Image (tube, rainbow, N blue to C red):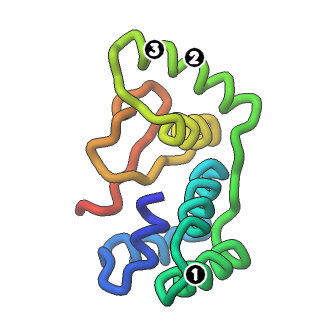
Amino acid sequence: MAVIAELTRPDGNRRVFNLFAQRQAACAIAAPALTAWLRGLDALPEGPRRQQLAAFTAELLHSGPEVVGVDRDAAIWLARSAVRWERSGRRWRRLDGEQAAIAATRDMSLVARSPHPLAGTDGLKLDDWFRP
């Protein structure tokens, strides 16, 4: 969600804007992240910011990256990884786990700010677009 949020900021990180523009065809949005985004949007009070974000979201859903969900393989990967994370004492959120599972089982990179709570997880590639 960090990339989606960054794209809505007029003074956002230029590196993120450029990488998204270059790689948009290879990008996807995890359905759980989209759900969280939409819930946050719906919770905003009426006003110019909500209108701007609603317009951005409509365009993103119309012509943006594919939305991918948690499927059987991702569910299995997440269940097995969650046990290891918990045994090692890692603090993680369900949304992080679901996004990681989707990325790992589709051989994609999870684009997120570093440090990420799931860094170092077998089979998970992380890519930080916010730092050179």
Q: Amino acid at mark 3?
A: Arg
Residue 112: x %, y % from top left: 39, 52
Mark 2 lies on a secondary structure that is helix
Q: Amino acid at mark 2?
A: Arg
Where 91 sits versus 26, above or below?
above
Q: Amino acid at mark 1?
A: Phe
Disc 2 versus disc 3: distance between alpha carbons?
Answer: 7 Å
Badge 1 or badge 3: first in the primary sequence: 1
Mark 1 lies on a secondary structure that is helix
Q: Residue drawn at (44%, 68%), measured in percent from left and top? A: 5
Q: Residue drawn at (58%, 35%), measured in percent from left and top? A: 101
Disc 1 versus disc 2: distance between alpha carbons?
Answer: 36 Å
Where 47 sits versus 28, above or below?
below
| Residue at mark 2 | 80
Disc 1 versus disc 3: distance between alpha carbons?
Answer: 38 Å
Report which quarter residue 60 is drawn in: bottom right
Q: Nearer the viewer, mark 1 or mark 3?
A: 1
Q: Are marks 2 and 3 in contact (CB under 8 Å)?
A: yes
Q: Are marks 1 and 2 in contact (CB under 8 Å)?
A: no
Q: State the quadrant of the C terminus.
A: bottom left
Q: Are marks 1 and 3 in contact (CB under 8 Å)?
A: no
Tally the marks: 3
Q: Which mark is residue 84?
A: 3
Residue 79: x %, y % from top left: 60, 20
Q: Residue furthest right?
A: 72
